[in-house]
Structures are given as structure tokens and as C-alpha cells.
Amino acid sequence: MSLQALVDQFTYSPSHSVPDWMLGCFRRRCISFANGESDNQTIVFWFQSRNFTIDLRLPLGVEQVRAAELEDYSATELAVLANYEGWVASCDWTDEKMSWHGGTALQTTDRWPEPAELHRIGNCMIEFAPSGAYVEDWRLQPSESGPLIGLRLVEEYDPDTGQRFPRDGGLIICGDHAAWVLGRSGPIADTTSSLPERAAGAVGDRERLQPLFDFETSVASGSLAQGYTVLHSTRPGRVGQPLLPAGKFDWIEDTRRVEQTFSLDGQDRVRVFEVDVIEPSHGFALETPSSEEADGWFQRESNTLGRYTEVLL
């Protein structure tokens, strides 16, 4: 069946600690650092499912590298590509803090080790680093009410031979927005060196570059009915393509798992997902509740408070 048909037939909403106001697709508007400097240019997306997160961080489009074979990139281009960031990880919400564990990332070192103190008002979610190193302003992206889907990739297998391949990754769909992570097909030997360091020593060498960049984080827009098209990706050649390969989805009875059967280089493959959440219709409201006193204050002072208001994304 199609993913749309799967969602129409099955609903799964587990127990969780992440509050509803944190669910959805957020884009970073600004990060401010303790040294007084701020960045509102980097392209950053945060997708939140019930129990895991997908994150993508890229330079401005004009500074991103062209789509090319890995061995054809110059040292300068590889340095840019090796500083892209994308990851998926499980999360926990405790004492007003979000922390992450496990998962897989394009980067081979942890660039964001701190938990996050999070507060949301309206479409604005503010993240404080407990150390005081930075604060981030995230904005919930507008979407019609629609599906909330979180599928965590567990493995792939060849249905003809039965050979199985463990692989981390995940899919999060939040109404009009979707994000996909496909982790490396195998481990890389040295995880103590940074990805930029490793890439710098392998310019022009496809055999060494391929396992380093055998990873994808992509963000897309669209719908379940029409499909999702990639807008931003750690893989330059993926922009403009369908987010997911064509194939059929099946719910595995008596489990929390879904399988997708698709074709890879002319051969059938199956991806196995653990279901985090399937909700056919979820509201991604840009507003948050406030007290009657606060509402009254805003109405009384609306001549000045609402003078220039607009929805900032």
C-alpha cells in the first residue's frame, strides 16, 4: 500500500515525554552567542517527532557546492561539503530540558553536546544552552493540519537472499513538511578525526571519500497524496528529487514496525522502520495559549502592540 493508505488505516501514538508544542518542523531564525555575535544566515531545520529529532544545517545556497562526483570536488569544495551537518537521534524531555542520545550523524564528532532548555510562545521556540554559550530562536513552519509521522529506520534487507544490513536513519512528516535521514551503510574506521580533516586528506580519492559521505539528511515539502520534493540536502544532487523512492509500505502485524519495499539499481530492497508515531491528522498551530489577563492586556494595548506585527518565519 502507499504511505497515504498506511496512514489512513493505522494510528499509533505512543507514550512520550515531548510536549505537543514541540512537535513539527521548525526553522532557525537566529542564533546569538555569548560573545555578542549572531547568525541569521545559516539554513537550519529541526524536525521533532514524539521520541526522536532530525536536524539539518547548511550554508547559504550560493555557498553550497555543485552536484558532482565526490572525486571531482576540489579541496575547497570538499571543505565546504564536509562542514554540512545532519543527524537523527533519540530524545528525552526532563526538567524543561531536551537531551539527545544514540542516532547517527554526517559529522564524525559531536558539535552540539549540550542539552537544550526550551520555551515556546506563539510560533517562536527559544532554545537556551545551559552553559550560556548561545541562545537560538526557532520558528514553527506553517502547515495545514495533516499527518504526524515518525518512522525510525532499523535495517535494510534483500528479500531474495535474506541478507540483512543494519542501518540507522529516520523519516519525520509534519503536514506539509518532511525530513529524511539515511545513515551510512557501514561504519567508518576512525571516528576520532573530524570529517573536514578526513576529507582534506582524501581529495580526488573516491574510494576513501565514498564511505565518509555515504550519508543523507534532506528536508522536503509537499503532501502524502502528491509526494514530497527535496528542498535542502547534505547531498547536493538530491535537491529537486522525490524525498522517498517509489515503493509500497506494509504494516507488520503484532509489531511496531513498517516495511517499505522498493527497487535499488534494479533489485528489490526492503527497509524496516520502527514506528514512533502515526497520527493521520495533527494540528500545527502557530499560536500558544495565554491567560485571560494576558489576552485582555494585548487587546487593550493593540493600537501600539499590533502596530507592525506579522508572522516571522
Image (spheres, helix red, strand yellow):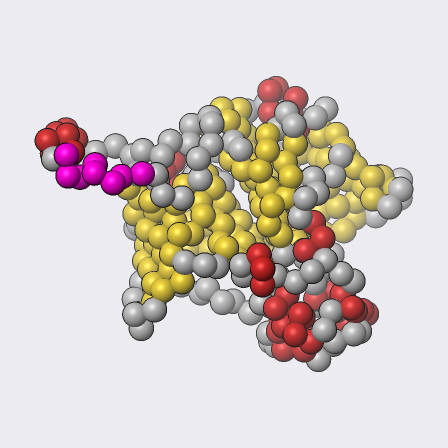
Relative to 58, 284 lies left or right: left
Q: Where is residue 130 in the image (x, y as percent from the top left)?
A: 31, 63
* Magenta-colored stretch includes residue 4: no
Relative to 260, 19 lies left or right: left
Relative to 107, 15 lies left or right: left
Looking at the rendered structure, the number of numbered marks drawn on it comes to 0
Would residue 274 be visible to someone looking at this image?
A: no
Residue drawn at 36 percent across, 34 percent down: 286
Would residue 124 be visible to someone looking at this image?
A: yes
Figure check: 163 above or below 68 = above
Q: Where is residue 257 in the image (x, y as percent from the top left)?
A: 64, 35
Q: Position of residue 245 (x, y in %)?
A: 74, 39
Residue drawn at 47 percent across, 32 percent down: 143
Residue lying furthest bottom: 201
Q: Majority secondary structure of the magenta segment?
A: loop
Relative to 235, 283 lies left or right: left
* Magenta-colored stretch includes residue 306: yes
- Of the pair 194 and 43, the residue shown nearer to us: 43
Rendered image quadrant of residue 254:
top right
Rendered image quadrant of residue 206:
bottom right
- Of the pair 309 and 239, the residue shown nearer to us: 309
Q: Give the range drawn in magenta.
A: 303-310
Q: Quadrant of the C terminus?
A: top left
Q: In which quarter of the image is the N terminus?
A: top right
Residue drawn at 67 percent across, 55 percent down: 235
- Of the pair 69 and 110, the residue shown nearer to us: 69
Rendered image quadrant of residue 188:
bottom right
- Of the pair 257 and 308, the residue shown nearer to us: 308
Figure check: 158 above or below 66 = above
Residue drawn at 83 percent across, 48 percent down: 163
Q: Position of residue 90 (x, y in %)?
A: 51, 50
